[in-house]
Image (cartoon, helix red, strand yellow):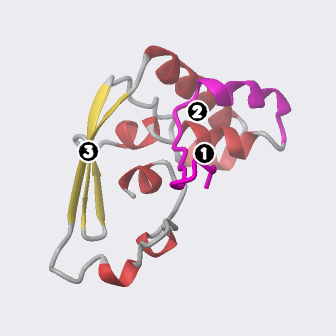
Amino acid sequence: MPLALATKKIERIADFEWPGFLPERFWKWGTPRVQMQVSFVDEEIDATHEVAKQWYDAQPSEFRLKHPFIEPSSKHETQLSLTSHYLSIGENTPAEHFQFQGRYYAQQLQWTNPSVKSKFSKLPGIFWFDQYRNLV
């Protein structure tokens, strides 16, 4: 779930779909805390930087004037922590958050720049399988 939130695959805990997961039970025994260590390889870092810049350059000039470009982090390892509704990524800098959003940037770009589809194989992602090995 923390990975799904960090990558913008979901926006809220209630959006998390996993067989047997019931969002209302997430807080049943008090404040939940989920922590994980996430690793990135150089290829994923480089591809994320590339699509982040392409995404930023594709934004309207009004957006770019108000929001300077922030390069995604280049950390090879970082910690995700989800405490109740609060997601923390590493030291919680914008660059660390943006490091997880490479696929989000590419998905936004693919409608106007079909060549970005070739980047998906290099971008980090989350792939869920059920117990029968079906892609969920």
Q: CA distance from mark 1 to mark 3?
A: 21 Å
Q: Residue furthest left?
A: 30
Asked whether 28 falls inside the magenta stretch, the response is no
**Residue 60 can be seen in this image:** no
Which residue is pictured at 52% across the width and 45% down the height? Answer: 67
Q: Looking at the rendering, in which quadrant would you find the N terminus?
A: bottom left
Q: Nearer the viewer, mark 2 or mark 1?
A: 1
Left or right, 115 with respect to 134, comes to right
Q: Amino acid at mark 1?
A: Tyr
30 or 136: which is nearer to us?
136
For residue 67, above or below residue 32: above
> Magenta stretch mostly in which secondary structure?
loop
Query: Measured from the top left, where is residue 12 in percent x and y?
Result: 45, 70
Q: CA distance from mark 3 to mark 2?
A: 24 Å
Figure disc tally: 3
Q: Amino acid at mark 3?
A: Met
Q: CA distance from mark 2 to mark 1?
A: 9 Å
Q: Tell me, for residue 52, which label it has, or none.
A: 2
- Residue hosting label 3: 36
For residue 92, above or below residue 20: above
Q: Residues within 10 Å of mark 2 (few under 14, many from 20)?
A: many
- Going from N to C along the chain, the mark reached first, 2 or 1, is 2
What is the span of residues highlighted in magenta in the rendered image? 112-136
Which residue is pictured at 38% across the width and 23% down the height? Answer: 74
**Residue 50 can be seen in this image:** yes
Q: Nearer the viewer, mark 3 or mark 2?
A: 3
Which residue is pictured at 39% across the width and 43% down the height? Answer: 97
105 or 125: which is nearer to us?
125
Q: Amino acid at mark 2?
A: Ala
Q: Tell me, for residue 104, which label it has, or none.
A: 1
For residue 53, above or below residue 68: above
